Every structure is written in C-alpha cells, then in structure tokens.
Amino acid sequence: MKCLPLVERDLSIGKPSQLIVALTIFSGVIATVLTGLLQVEIAFTAGVVTMILAGVLPVKDLYEHIDWPVIVLLGAMIPVGTAFETSGAADLVAEQILTLGTEFPLWMTIGLVMGPGGYKFGDYWRMGLPLDIIILLLATPLILLFWPA
C-alpha cells in the first residue's frame, strides 16, 4: 500500500520478547476478569505490577504517562456521585430520562449523536438509505435461506 506517516513520531514498539510477555500478562489479566476469579481493579493492578516486575514497564515510564488531572477528577467525582445517589437525585434524573425516552426515543437518540458528531440531518439520509437498501437486499434472501418457511 506504500502508506507514509503524516508526522514523524518518537514511537517505539518495543522488543519482540517484551511484547510477547506483555501480551501474555494482559491475556492472563483479561482471563481472570472474564472467569470471575478477580475483580477488574485488582486484576489490572496485579497486571501492572507483574509488568513492572517482569521488566516490561519501567517505573519511570509509568509515572510519566499517567494523566494526573484525570486521576484527580475521578477522585473528586466519587463524593459527588455518592451525594447524587444518596440524595435521591439519581433516581429523579433516571425517571425523567426514561419518561423522555419513551415519548421521544428516536429524536432523543438522533439529538445525542448529532451534536457531538457534528452531523446534519441530511447525513442520516445520505448514509442510512443506501445502508437500508443493502440490508434489505441481503437480509431477505439470507433469512429465507437460513430460516425457510
């Protein structure tokens, strides 16, 4: 394909042997979470400690790449969330959202996507109509093939 990077970066993938160790540790962490042996927080913390002990992740890099403002923000939001829940405000907001969702489900979804995505209403027709046609042309014969009458 001969693709060229748009910007040069100081990015190193790492040593292949370390990559295998890192993938093995990460796979083990995911497996322990999926099987329910450990909670997510404990499993990933153990995975990071294991990567440090295995020499895959230098401690210096660990501290340099932590986004501390996000950590502070998350820590500050815990009491806000607790207050929101214990005051009953969470239940009130959830009920209002459910009420609005049952009255205006399609428009609410479109509105939630349009603003942040920068979409215009015509974008839905431009992408949606051809996609609907493709689904109709493919789904009808495949449904009849896999689930005959």
Image (cartoon, rainbow, N blue to C red):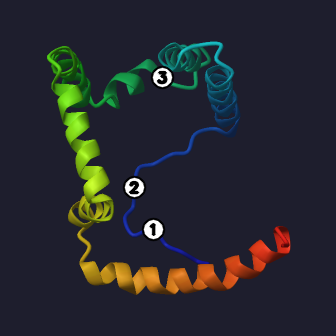
| Disc 2 element | loop
Q: Earlier in the sequence, mark 1 or mark 3?
A: 1
Left or right placement of residue 64 versus residue 143 in this view: left
> Which residue is the site of mark 3?
58
| Disc 3 element | loop
| Disc 1 element | loop
Specify the label residue 117 is tagged with.
none
Judge by depth and name the residue closer to the eye, 14 or 145: 145
Q: Report crowding for label 1: few under 14, some 14 to 19, many 20 or more residues within 10 A (C-alpha).
A: few
Judge by depth and name the residue closer to the eye, 20 or 93: 93
For the point 57% across and 20% down, which residue is it?
51
How far is disc 2 from disc 1 in space, using C-alphas?
Answer: 9 Å
Image quarter (top left, top right, bottom left or bottom right) of the N terminus? bottom right
For the point 29% across and 43% down, which residue is it?
98
Image quarter (top left, top right, bottom left or bottom right) of the C terminus? bottom right
Q: Are marks 2 and 1 in contact (CB under 8 Å)?
A: yes
> Which residue is the site of mark 2?
9
The residue under label 1 is which amino acid type?
Pro
Q: Is residue 141 above or below residue 52?
A: below
Q: Are marks 3 and 2 in contact (CB under 8 Å)?
A: no
Left or right placement of residue 70 versus residue 66 in this view: left
Q: Is residue 73 above or below residue 41?
A: below
The residue under label 3 is which amino acid type?
Pro
The residue under label 2 is which amino acid type?
Arg
> Which residue is the site of mark 1?
5
Q: Residue 22: percent from the left, percent from the top?
A: 63, 30
Q: Earlier in the sequence, mark 3 or mark 2?
A: 2
For the point 33% across and 64% down, which residue is it?
106
Judge by depth and name the residue closer to the eye, 126 or 9: 126
Q: Report crowding for label 2: few under 14, some 14 to 19, many 20 or more residues within 10 A (C-alpha).
A: few
Judge by depth and name the residue closer to the eye, 46 or 40: 40
How far is disc 1 from disc 3 in space, using C-alphas?
Answer: 27 Å
